[in-house]
Amino acid sequence: MIQSTQPIKDLLKVWEVERLITPLDRHFALELALVHQQQLTALDKSHSSDNSCTQSLYKEDSYSELFLLTCALLSKQLSQQHTCLPIKQIVLDNPMVEQVSNCQITCSHDELTSLLAQFACIGLVSPESQVEQVAAAATPIVLDCGDLYLQRYYQFETQVSDTLIQLSKEPGSQVSPATKASLDILFPAPDDVTVFDWQKIATATAFSKKLAVITGGPGTGKTTTVTKLLFLLTQESPMTIRLVAPTGKAAARLSESIKASKQRLKLELAPYAHQINLDSLTRVPEEASTLHRLLGVIPNSHKFRHHKDNPLRLDLLVVDEASMVDLPMMHKVLSALPSHARLILLGDQDQLASVEAGAVLADICAGLKARSDAQSKWQMRYSAGYAQTLSTLTSFDLSLFTSESPKIGDSLCMLMHSHRFKGDAGIGQLAAAVNNSDKAGIMQVWQRGYEELLWIEHQKTQSGNTGLDQLLSLAVSHYKRYLELAKDNTATATDIIDSYNEFRILCAMRAGEYGVDGINLSVTNALKQAKLITTDVEFYQGRPVIIQSNDYNLGLFNGDIGLILLDNEKSAQNGSVPRLMAHFIQADGSILKVLPARLPSHDTCFAMTVHKSQGSEFANVGLVLPLWPSLAQKQLLTKELVYTAITRAKQHFTCLGSQTVFEHASLQATQRSSGLARRLWL
Ligand SMILES: Nc1ncnc2c1ncn2[C@@H]1O[C@H](COP(=O)(O)OP(=O)(O)OP(=O)(O)O)[C@@H](O)[C@H]1O
């Protein structure tokens, strides 16, 4: 059932050298092969008199070879952020997808599935088996519905889906005529009665359900909706509410948005002060923290203080930017949730999936699409009974959106109208066309010549790339402002950081001339030429830094961005000579200062990856796409990546690229193998 030019053990080394697998993948496969061998030896001893065909069959070398190959493929799959390996996706005549195949699996996918199901190291999940039984069997690998999992990921996925399903079945607050009256005040009837106010429907959902997932693109009103909901809830009874986001930057932005939203709500509700208790607006929390902080980091440990046996002390948890939350983290959050607590997930399901394994938010929303392709439209999926409840509460007839198999559909709400982008504005149009993989639409938007959009074509000549030069001039003109402000002793660190955040270059990848490394170097050189940086020392006034690893003791986390600035404040206090410190804005708006020498691993941050930009927004964004992407780079260029980059921009979006690469990326959707959508929706 397996043919190869060399033993798989040797091929693993070849594949590692060719970077088809990582050293970790090879190590992992060899370790599991060892466990397999030990189990065979144990079986051998216990069945020394047993001559059954199956026993002898599995001792054959080719079976061990197949097992070793399968383990390497599974590990590779996990390294690429999938949570499982669907056996049907294995390319039988070239499983490692080499230039020239060195090994083939000579049986069909079905035969392969049946074979793998019989390995002692692989636990088979039958329709009757319970999650606990599978865990108790403690096989390192699990085979469920044709998908192979590591036991750990299988547990994460099944427990996350079980908890979400359970939460979606439970009620939130009791609805009453007073709830309807308050909703009517919070959301005045639209002029056009045929237009549904999905914000009102989402608020009613999150009020009456224990789980609410409110998704939508930028500016669709997720924060506005959740502010109104929290206001409504605080009218009812006191509640401990916590607001969190995956990164410090996203938490700070959530805090800012809630504050602004509360201000707007106060003005909007002023005429109704005699009907609704405005005082409870002060009880709506504004402070947001990171998920790490919420769960309680234990220094030098990967475990958190809060977990199943020491749950969080809260009644309602709001998680913003949920698309950035990976499967293991979602598992930790759900495990730490006390049994009475309610959960609201906010996010944009079309954004890049999390940096680590899984695509949890996209999987949660997957059931609202008839098909998995980009053109398929979203459609709500309410149970008939709940549609009726929502219709009564909101006065919108939701009977059109019912389903005979709603599953978790009652807990979902999708906001589709962006209030940030004007209907005809370029950024919104381009983001929508890319999100729909609409090739003709993308071309039309670029050709319309919107003031908000600038296309720069790579123009490679013998002496350089004039396209890149144009982007660098743009970068110099933007970064000049904050670098000059940094020299002004009267400017505060917050002012300087705000000015720096007006512009950012985003790259599709890290390495290469057009990756983060190359572009950071080019921008630094351009700023030196413009005399805006006048030193070669590592830490200079105004150097932007991005943290690359978590340092729980310092309170700095992967992706945090700060500026090296003179600590004028301290010197004004004690009269000392100001010294350079790294300044970071915290989620609560305060500044964290760290000695540059104490910073954990970090890089310069004139340019950053699109991945790291999630949860942030900038007035002006410049996206850099590679000129001639390699095959591996092409796989990373997806519509989610381009969409995320475009939607980081509030005022101007510039792209340095070539038309073919932009088009290729916009037409390619991210595929993350996972069984979560199936568990939630089938
Ligand atoms: N129903 C509405 N009518 C008019 N303007 C609205 C409405 N809802 C939201 N807005 C405005 O749209 C802007 C974005 O709203 P909000 O911050 O709530 O969206 P969001 O989805 O949370 O955005 P982001 O994706 O940036 O987090 C705000 O200026 C808000 O005042």
Image (tube, rainbow, N blue to C red):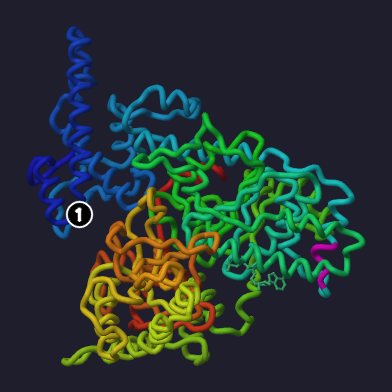
Locate residue 508 relative to residue 411 in the image: left or right.
Answer: left
The residue sitting at 51% across, 71% down in the picture is: 436
Report which residue position mark 1 lands on. 20
Image position of 411 (left or right of 247):
right
Taking depth in this image into account, of 560 and 202 the one nearest to the observer is 560
Residue 101 highlighted magenta (yes or no): no
Judged left or right of residue 516, residue 221 is right
Most extreme residue toward the right is 274
Q: Is residue 601 above or below residue 13?
A: below
Residue type at mark 1?
Answer: Leu
Measured as percent of width and height from the top left, residue 396 is found at 81, 60
**Magenta-colored segment: predominant secondary structure:** loop
Q: Residue furthest top?
A: 49
Identify the magenta region.
185-190
**Residue 165, quarter of the rendered image:** top right
Q: Quadrant of ligand 1?
A: bottom right
Residue nearest the observer in this picture, 637 or 489: 489
Look at the image and tell me whether residue 25 can be seen. Answer: yes
> In what quadrant of the picture does the C terminus appear?
top right
Q: On the picture, is 509 further left or further right than 68?
A: right
| Quarter occupied by residue 513 | bottom left
Instruction: Please state, as top left, top right, bottom left or bottom right, where the N terminus lies in the image.
Output: top left
Residue 605: x and y in percent read: 34, 71
